[in-house]
Image (spheres, rainbow, N blue to C red):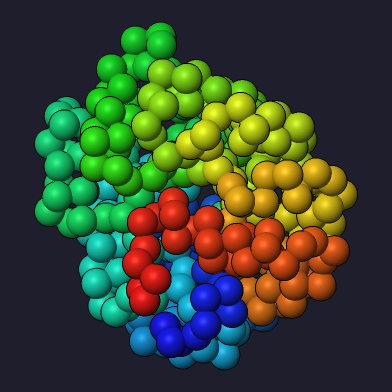
Amino acid sequence: MSDDLPGQGAIDVHVHIQPWEMMKPWAHETITRGRNDHELIKACMASPHALAEHLDREGIEKVALINYVAPDIMGFLPDVNDWAARYRDEAKGRVIGFGGIDPAATPDMRSEMKRLFEDLRLDALKIHPPHQDLAPNAYRHGNKDLEIVYRMLSDYGRPIMFHTGTSIFPGARSLLGDPMLVDDVAVDFPDLKIILAHGGRPLWMAEAFFLLRRHPNVFMDISGIPPKKLLEYFPRLEEIGDKVMFGTDWPSPGVKSMRKNLDDFNDLNLSERVKQNVRRGTAHRVFGLKENE
Ligand SMILES: [Zn+2]
């Protein structure tokens, strides 16, 4: 769909096609409960071609696959990075590949970051503070590894995404989902492109809105927010529209399909300029995509 006119397509910057076989049983049970599309999800996990066919059906040109490392709460080990890079390479331009880091289990963070961004050439990094029991600003309290991560990402020009908002997975530390913990990072690393996943939903939308207005390099995705409710959550979305990205969180609990979310988003009372930015313009700038990518 790369020959679509600019503004016609949509990029979903938040999709959880991950190696679910790594998941702890209780985490797996939480993410699969109540779904009737297990076969489709399994097929997409096994094959980037199956995902591409599904994206064509859903009207989505490209997706960012969100992988991260969270051994204790979710079961995701550092091998998710190899999985993510391989999948992205096979997906022929339809996938933006996120990876993750686990400071507690990484003896040499500098060489791990080199591995992720020079050898595997991942596109971005995800940190999930509630699932990793890791505060985004922990570098201010002695976590030197995080400082290395933020510095190297700034140098590589690659974005970082923080989960913001609560989490329903057993053992998750929702307090660490407060977006205000990211304020320090934006102050101390002004060149780092930061994405607040979920806009702090459901507790901290005002905080997320503040951070987007305060810091030039802070962005957010709308994943996990039912699009019909988006303007209730962010009544002044129009003001930050050039910093917001479409995302669904599919196939997480409660997210039926990417297409349904896209249709509901398109029906919102927003200017066409903001809709185009949210659907793909902002993602193009944040991930440094070329117009024909
Ligand atoms: Zn997510």
Displayed quadrant of residue 192? top left
Count of picture labels: 0
Picture coordinates of residue 277, whole percent (x, y) = 60, 60
Q: Residue at position x 41%, y 11% from top?
A: 140
Q: Residue at position x 73%, y 44% from top?
A: 239
Displayed quadrant of residue 188? top left
Asked whether, in this view, residue 74 is left or right of residue 33, the answer is left
User: Residue 158 or 256: which is nearer the viewer?
Assistant: 158
- Residue 6 visible in the displayed image: yes
Q: Residue at position x 74%, y 37% from top?
A: 205
Q: In the rendered view, tell whether residue 132 sits above or below residue 97.
A: above
Q: In the rendered view, tell whether residue 240 sits above or below residue 105.
A: below
User: Residue 3 or 25: which is nearer the viewer?
Assistant: 3
- Residue 30 visible in the displayed image: no
Q: Residue at position x 55%, y 23% from top?
A: 183
Q: Residue furthest top?
A: 141
Quarter of the image where the C terminus is located = bottom left
Q: In the rendered view, tell whether residue 23 sits above or below residue 21.
A: above
Asked whether, in this view, residue 247 is left or right of residue 54, the answer is right
Picture coordinates of residue 143, whole percent (x, y) = 33, 17
Picture coordinates of residue 25, whole percent (x, y) = 50, 56
Picture coordinates of residue 1, whole percent (x, y) = 46, 87
User: Residue 18 or 22: which is nearer the viewer?
Assistant: 18
Asked whether, in this view, residue 284 is left or right of residue 83, the answer is right
Q: In the rendered view, tell whether residue 216 sits above or below residue 85.
A: above
